[in-house]
Image (cartoon, rainbow, N blue to C red):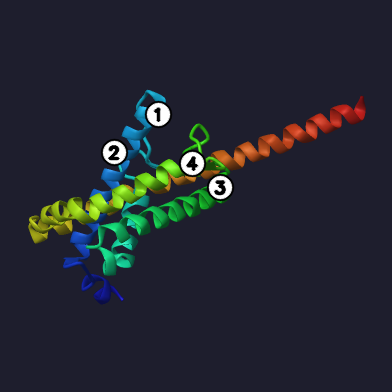
Amino acid sequence: MIHSILNFTFRGMNINQLVIWFFIYSFLGWCMECVVIRHQLGYWENRGFAKSPFCIIYGFGLFFAFILFRPIEHNFFALYIAGAICATAFEFLTAQVMLKLFGEVWWNYDHLRFNYKGIICLQSTIGWGFVAVFVFGAVNRLVQNIVFSINHKVAVAISILLIVVYLVDFTYHFSMRLIQNESMREFNSKARNTVKEFFRIG
């Protein structure tokens, strides 16, 4: 199992290079989210789940996109359509998972026309298509060149550091969010029972 992981390659990258590639895209996704929210709300907001500057949903999304879109990655029209549809579906599924875990979604498209329950909208779908073309057409070449230029031993150290730091950060804030949500549910339940008892006595 460990041997298979260590020998895993993805688009010419070994596992350590892939980890760095993954976190570069997670960082770029975090930057994009912060800029978009700054434009919409007028103030800066950390868009990552944890405190570190990464939105790993972008890392995972692009990892799967490079697998799924490999047959069409040089056909920019097909890439635009596939990117728009798949990214919107991925956004919708992510929102459903967040609703199940936390009872809320950390974005809201209610202020935009042609939205569905505030979690997907036509404007973002159009934007995802352009993002797909931009990433496949230009950005990934630059990202991979950066990754391949890193010394092997340095890449190992950086990949381990990134994983450890993010896992600690994520685990802590994920646990805190679950505890907060559970406490809020208990508070709401007690409040409802108190109100019922008050009216029953009255």
Q: Give left or right: position of 113 versus 57.
A: right
Look at label 2 and name its amino acid. Answer: Cys
Residue assigned mark 3: 99
Horizontal and vertical percent position of residue 151 = 7, 57
Pick whichever of labels 1 and 2 is earlier in the sequence.
2
Q: Could you tell me which secondary element the residue under label 4 belongs to?
A: helix
Pick whichever of labels 1 and 3 is earlier in the sequence.
1
Horizontal and vertical percent position of residue 50 = 38, 42
Residue assigned mark 1: 40
In what quadrant of the picture does the N terminus appear? Answer: bottom left
Look at label 1 and name its amino acid. Answer: Gln
Q: Is residue 127 above or below residue 140?
A: above
Residue drawn at x 38%, y 38% is: 47
Pick whichever of labels 1 and 4 is earlier in the sequence.
1
Mark 2 crowd level (few <14, some 14–19, many ≥20, 10 Å Cα): some
Look at label 3 and name its amino acid. Answer: Leu
Look at label 4 and name its amino acid. Answer: Met
**Viewer-nearest of discs 1 and 2:** 1
Q: Give left or right: position of 24 versus 180.
A: left
Mark 1 touches mark 3? (CB < 8 Å):
no
Residue assigned mark 4: 176
**Viewer-nearest of discs 1 and 3:** 1
Q: Nearer the viewer, residue 122 or 50?
A: 122
Residue assigned mark 2: 31
